[in-house]
Amino acid sequence: MNNKEIIDLDSKYIIQNYGRQPIALSHGEGVIIWDTDGKQYIDFFAGLAVNVLGQSHPKVIKTIQKQAEKLIHVSNVYYTEEQVKLAKKLSEISIFDRVFYANSGAEANEGAIKLARKFTGKGEIISANNSFHGRTLATVTATGQDKYKEPFKPLPTGFMHVPFGDSKAISNAINDDTAAILIEAIQGEGGVVVPPENYLKEVESICKENNVILILDEIQTGFGRIGEMFAYELYGIKPDIITIAKALGNGYPIGGVLARGEVATAFDFGDHGTTFGGNALGCAVAMTVIETIKEENLLENSKTVGEYFKDKLYKLKEKHDFIKDVRGFGLFLALELDQNSSDITDKMLKKGFLINSTAGNVLRFVPPLIIKKDHVDKLIKALDNLFFEI
């Protein structure tokens, strides 16, 4: 089928809750993707920060084929080798002791909220304005953006919001029923908003002083996106819990809650569960993703190409006065404009680039970690030419 035929079927048979761009993607190799009409695109979106190894990575393909011939899913009623191997690997590459497997970032954040409440015996979760933590009723309530919540009231109780970047506001908001602070390392959906210097360290200290659990949402920042395996390393903090998903499976759905110390042992049998979380295929793929990030030196690529990319974005800012800001670390970057950015993503699509608009006026760039400088050069040239037309 071609683009139009697929789009027509979508409009007839699929609930219309996505504002999709008008193409149907067919196949890809590395950072290049083709649509069903045969047009080629360079991917600077990576399936929303998911496909860190790009499309059709040979090691991922081999793992899926090999594991699918062996075992895909058996449920968590039984043990599997793939689960425990990945759990051990996650512990080895982090400061955390145990993992609870999930299917998505939202489910991971749900699990983290429940774990913090179970451990502390308290109910309130403090999160930040402009944050995004998921689409379930609990995680959308934790999200600090009204546009995601308004249609779904009444919402669960036990959530409070404070300004992002204001540690004093967190300190003032803590009360006798505060279980945890849930905060993004960098606000992704909110516009790649980087916290002020020392903010996360201050939050960490406040949590320790008040015996409050610190949950760091690393759904977008984890697994090399910002040039480190995890963002807590970049900021020099030790959260009690982090939540992970997206990049972990390079497109295969898998997420998790990583916890350390006594917090990691708070759940008893039956307290929480999932049917598909941690299935054998997902764990095998995730293991391959982690190993490949290390084997192909993609943390360093994220840093070096990210620095190159950021410098190019700053040079664009010098040339075009409607660019307000350049933000981010590694390959988690953004241009903030003084105008709506959605039209630009549409125009760049026609030029053969997949990029993303978020927060109304922000262009977000989250390419596969295998992206090269020449890909960046092509994007910058196309943006530059487009900006002169605005």
Image (cartoon, rainbow, N blue to C red):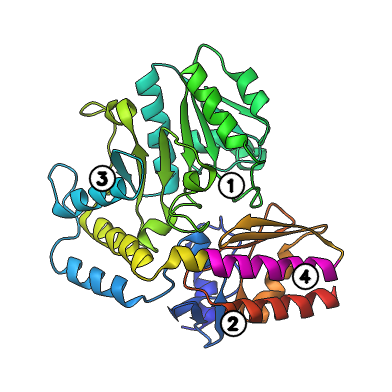
The residue range painted magenta reads 303-320
Question: Along the polypeptide, which appears first: circle 1 or circle 3?
Answer: 1
Q: Amino acid at mark 1?
A: Ile
Q: CA distance from mark 4 to mark 2?
A: 16 Å
Q: Which residue is mark 4?
A: 316
User: How packed is label 1: few (under 14 Cα within 10 Å), some, or many (20 or more)?
Assistant: many
Of the pair 66 and 233, the residue shown nearer to us: 233
Instruction: Locate the C terminus by quadrant.
Output: bottom right
Disc 4 vs disc 1: Cβ atoms closer than 8 Å?
no
| Upstream in sequence: badge 3 or badge 4 | 3
Residue at which label 1 appears = 186
Q: Position of residue 187 (x, y in %)?
A: 60, 46
Find numbered disc 3 in the image and state the secondary structure of the residue it sits on: loop
Q: Is residue 313 magenta?
A: yes
Residue 374 showing in the rendered view: yes
The secondary element bearing badge 2 is classed as: helix
Indicate which label's residue lies in the foreground, 1 or 3.
Answer: 1
Q: Residues within 10 Å of mark 4 (few under 14, many from 20)?
A: some
Q: CA distance from mark 2 to mark 1?
A: 27 Å
Q: Which residue is mark 2?
A: 374
Residue 296, given in percent of the width and then of the height, sits at 38, 71
Dot 2, crowdedness within 10 Å: few (<14), some or many (≥20)? Answer: few
Determine the residue positioned at 57% across, 43% down. Answer: 132
- Describe residue 223's horizontal placement relative to residue 133 as left or right: left
